[in-house]
Image (cartoon, rainbow, N blue to C red):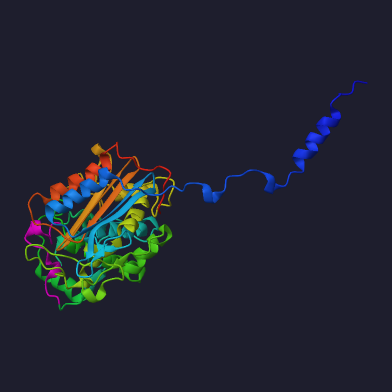
Amino acid sequence: MYKPKNITFLFLLFFSLTSCNKDDVMMPDPGEMDPVVQEDITAVDNRVQSFMEKYNITGASIAVSKNEKMVYTKGYGMANVSKSELVTPEHVFRVASISKMFTGVAILRLVEDGKLNLDDKVFGPSGILGNKFGTATLTDQELEITVDHLLHNSFGGWGVASGGDPIDYFPSYNNDEFIEYLLNEWDLVYPIEDTYVYSNTGYWLLARIVEKVTEESFSNFVKNIFNPTGISSLHYTKFTREDRQAKEVEYYGQDGEEDYVYKISSRRDGDGGVVISAPDLLRAVCALDKLPLRENVLSDNTIELLRGNGPLSPNWGRGIGFWNEQQFWWTTGALPATRSWLISRYDGLSVVMILNSKSNDSSFDIDFNNTISAIANDATIPWKNGLDQF
């Protein structure tokens, strides 16, 4: 019988390999491995700082994600001038009408859960709010207003384009009194689905619908939707210094503009009340982008409803704007001493930027848009693909 001559050697080699202690194996020391850390990106910083200097912006915060990983976040300028406090990513800002995105999501979550339909009437005997308001004066048109008309600003009034938005009238009225006043005193100017009228009052009413259907506060319902995403800074402001959050910036009006002009906080939740940090706002964006890495708060089909255009505005969805030809969705907001913007490209690059000051210069909004768009669309910016700061 044939016997290998080197069997003894092979046995010793096998014994040597299998009896090695795991501590004898040369593994990299985790302490010696270089972690992926954020480094300043000149192409981003120069654009932001140049814009801020041009318009005398006090402070700004930016956050950028690529394929649902936060690859850049940074604060610029001052959060509080009197305290020499610099802006950091942890600071929270008012975001104004970006709040409407959260309202749209809240309504669509109820639709997704089968608790609401987009074509449900709002007022009257068959309406969500029922006969509680305006029964003596309800017009046929008011009886025809649906949830979707409010989302798409297509119900014919209660906005600047129809002669004024009543949202800040009669600050002493509580919510019920204000709705009664609205229906009794403010006629709708245009037929339904005839003229687009951007309405803060409409989105405030949507928040009341959420409360009616859920029997809980609007703010709690929204927070519970986004809690699984890791958002911790979301707050609905009362627009007073006394209500400022622990890490909330101060606001700096320009040209005599008041820093805290909106006093009727109960009418500014669904249309403009969110306070949030830039990284947390980016978390919300990533929860609505249909990409697979991070959990979405709505199904893909419902997110398409969020982006779905109405009968009067080809680029306005249900709480957000979109530009399908350029492959991105967006939304923006403005209040005295507040400006915010976000862009989310369909290929996975998203940018949010929030300011605690706002210029009244006619070119300001265009330049703000150009600044954030340039950051979102510059393919040469060296984002670190291995970095995720979420």
* Position of 12 relative to 103 (above/below): above
Q: Nearer the viewer, residue 246 or 298?
A: 246
The answer to whether residue 40 shows anywhere in this view is yes
The answer to whether residue 137 shows anywhere in this view is no
Look at the image and give the residue range highlighted in magenta: 156-171
Residue 72, horizontal then vertical, whole percent: 34, 49
| Residue in the image at 26% along x and 39% along y | 377
Left or right: 140 in relation to 114: left
Residue 347, horizontal then vertical, whole percent: 34, 40
Quarter of the image with the C terminus is: bottom left
Residue 159, horizontal then vertical, whole percent: 12, 60
Quarter of the image with the N terminus is: top right
| Residue in the image at 20% along x and 46% along y | 371
Residue occupying the far top of the picture? 2
**Residue 167 falls within the magenta-colored stretch:** yes
Q: Quadrant of residue 250?
A: bottom left
**Residue 31 falls within the magenta-colored stretch:** no
